[in-house]
Amino acid sequence: TGVATMKFKSPPVNSLSLEFLTEFSISLEKLENNRACRGVIITSAVPKIFSSGLDITEMCGKSVEHYTEFWRALQEMWLRLYGSNMVTVAAVNGSSPAGGCLVALSCDYRIMAENPKFSIGLNEAQLGIVAPFWFKDAFVNVVGHRVAERSLQLGSLHPAPEAHKLGLVDELVPEEKLMEKAAAVMAQWLALPDHARQLTKTMMRKAVLDRLVAHREEDIKNFISFVSKESIQKSLRMYMEMLKKRK
Amino acid sequence: TGVATMKFKSPPVNSLSLEFLTEFSISLEKLENNRACRGVIITSAVPKIFSSGLDITEMCGKSVEHYTEFWRALQEMWLRLYGSNMVTVAAVNGSSPAGGCLVALSCDYRIMAENPKFSIGLNEAQLGIVAPFWFKDAFVNVVGHRVAERSLQLGSLHPAPEAHKLGLVDELVPEEKLMEKAAAVMAQWLALPDHARQLTKTMMRKAVLDRLVAHREEDIKNFISFVSKESIQKSLRMYMEMLKKRK
Amino acid sequence: TGVATMKFKSPPVNSLSLEFLTEFSISLEKLENNRACRGVIITSAVPKIFSSGLDITEMCGKSVEHYTEFWRALQEMWLRLYGSNMVTVAAVNGSSPAGGCLVALSCDYRIMAENPKFSIGLNEAQLGIVAPFWFKDAFVNVVGHRVAERSLQLGSLHPAPEAHKLGLVDELVPEEKLMEKAAAVMAQWLALPDHARQLTKTMMRKAVLDRLVAHREEDIKNFISFVSKESIQKSLRMYMEMLKKRK
């Protein structure tokens, strides 16, 4: 059918570790270069979670070289996903904070399980950190400036019904219908001639992609200088301990 | 009353041919230079169709000189309409795909007959072609980035009720009330002092107008190189034959 | 609690006079420099009116030096308010046209008394004048391009329920609950770590703030040349006389 399904399977919470990001990028690249593949559905094999976002252990007590490599891998993944020539559909079958939300935001279409216990959002501010400008750009392109301004400042995690109301996801369906619906949406998008659709997508997304490409090294330096601060290291460690206790 | 009504009357479907576009521009210019005229209502004299968009015969098997003249005439019409100092109201009394949608998008206010059989949208992608960047800019200014991204990629033609829900048209009224409503809206807009209204309109639209002015020759070259491709010529010919069979 | 309340008290209508604007800026600066203060609630001590906007007497029959000083004070207030590091909540307990609307627009959150007799909007066009580009930028950031284009051209004053529907205010509450609600919203925003929230706010607002900073002198010249026109002086005098008769 020309459609691949990519299932995140990195328990317990599909954290975006350096390894995960690298594999994700390689998989996207392979599919992109495979002429038989025209679309990809992204979902999770882990119950209740789509992706929990950046792996905080990659950001704690590591070397500058490690931070650089990690951040570059994150940029690489996003440039591939947001700029993909394939049709990309996110089947969000669980919660999706921070970097997990970014993955969903970067697809062409977002379907979410209509479970109010599942939430999605760029909640970086809650952790005392700031979403990178390109997370923000992708977010504004989906929900508009005002919703983005409020949601980012509050670090909001929106329960599925609210996310739908805000336009952060396009559609809600019962969880058991999620993959069926994703396949139907994919078929609708693939009914269009690839070339015209791809050029149109590029026209819509190029400005935001170019902005990261132009400021890529600056963005890495910015991340390193931020994450190297003792105050940030401390709050990340506290956050990790809180997560451990929760389990 | 200072209000002109412009009725498109080029059966069967008000295609935007070179001749049509040239006449349209001249009419706009005359009204613009007529101090007695402060507003124009644009509608169709052809049943069920507002305008079917660009005349595909102008894009098939013609010379580079012809393509250049055609595209320049399209740009000229749009620069005049989108940048008009008059109040412009579209009374959309029929379907309005592609270039027809652009005409409506470029007015100050859009009223559409509330007939779900009438649809409107930038459906270029369905034909294997790509809407020019300035169609996209005008579209984003009306419906926002997300709706535009999805609608343009899918080449959607939105039935009137959906178009209203998306903000693509401002209001739906029964077809027999369309002109009455257009006149009432026009009166409301003309109640404002012209000078302040015009400066405000310019402030809102200048960035997008300037972008075409700055890239006008590039946009023409881009169109010619696109339309000269054998693959595009082929799909346009197929599309025309399909249209003929439909009749 | 780290929260200040600023109550506009300049009867009869809290006009933004040179003196008012200067005091407003000084108050904001003091609060900004006071580490104990993390948020400010802005409301009115005058019944039925939040602020009536720019004081027209400052714009009538004065010297170029006066116009310059007045406009610079307006810019200064806005740069401080829109760029404030504090959480800013507008408790809009009355009508709020023109510059009054700008004050509300520049806060992080807007709560309005749900009284349909209270209205809010950038109604400059009704007076034959044009809102400055930075009023427009702040407006577009809140309500989007299309709503702004229409509202600014018509100089609309939106009754509270309509303002809420358009996203111009975030929430409506009964007037007697306004301050209670403002305090609750403030507490929600202050629950976030200041530093991350401030950097996020800057990321969202910097482009628009920078645009005024870059064009500040040009904007002053523009105002002076506009306000010095005899036709504008005449319509402002007529407007003032109409206001006097109303009383």
Image: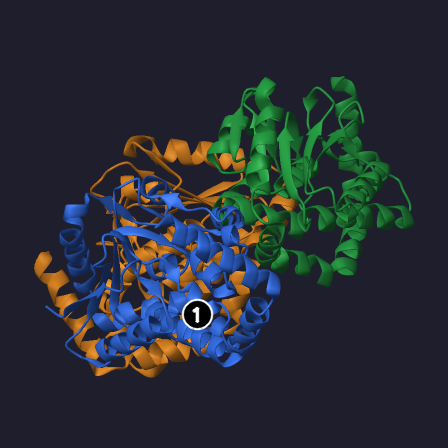
Chain colours: A blue, B orange, C green
Residue closest to the eye, C119 or B51:
C119
Tell me the residue at 27%/73% (across/down): B59
Q: Quadrant of residue A41?
A: bottom left
Does residue B123 appear in the picture of this structure?
A: yes
Residue closest to the eye, C115 or C154:
C115
Q: Quadrant of residue A173?
A: top left
Tell me the residue at 40%/32% (across/down): B181
Q: Secondary structure at mark 1?
A: helix
Side (left or right) of A185 relative to B75? left
Instruction: Determine whether A233 is above or below B167 in the image.
Output: below
Residue closest to the eye, C32 or B246:
C32
Q: In x, y percent, where is residue B227?
A: 29, 77
Instruction: Determine whether B73 is above or below C87 in the image.
Output: below
The quadrant of the picture occupied by the C terminus of chain B is bottom left
Residue closest to the eye, B128 or A217:
A217
Q: Residues within 10 Å of mark 1 (few under 14, many from 20)?
A: some
Instruction: Determine whether B108 is above or below A211 in the image.
Output: above
Which of the chains bears the disc numbered 1? A
* Residue at the extreme left of the image, as rendered: B245
Q: In x, y percent, where is residue B79?
A: 49, 62
Q: In x, y percent, where is residue B34?
A: 56, 50
Residue, disc 1: A58
Tell me the residue at 61%/30% (across/down): C183
Q: Amino acid at mark 1?
A: Glu
Q: In x, y percent, where is residue C202?
A: 62, 56
Tell me the residue at 65%/52% (across/down): C133
Side (left or right) of C158 relative to A185? right
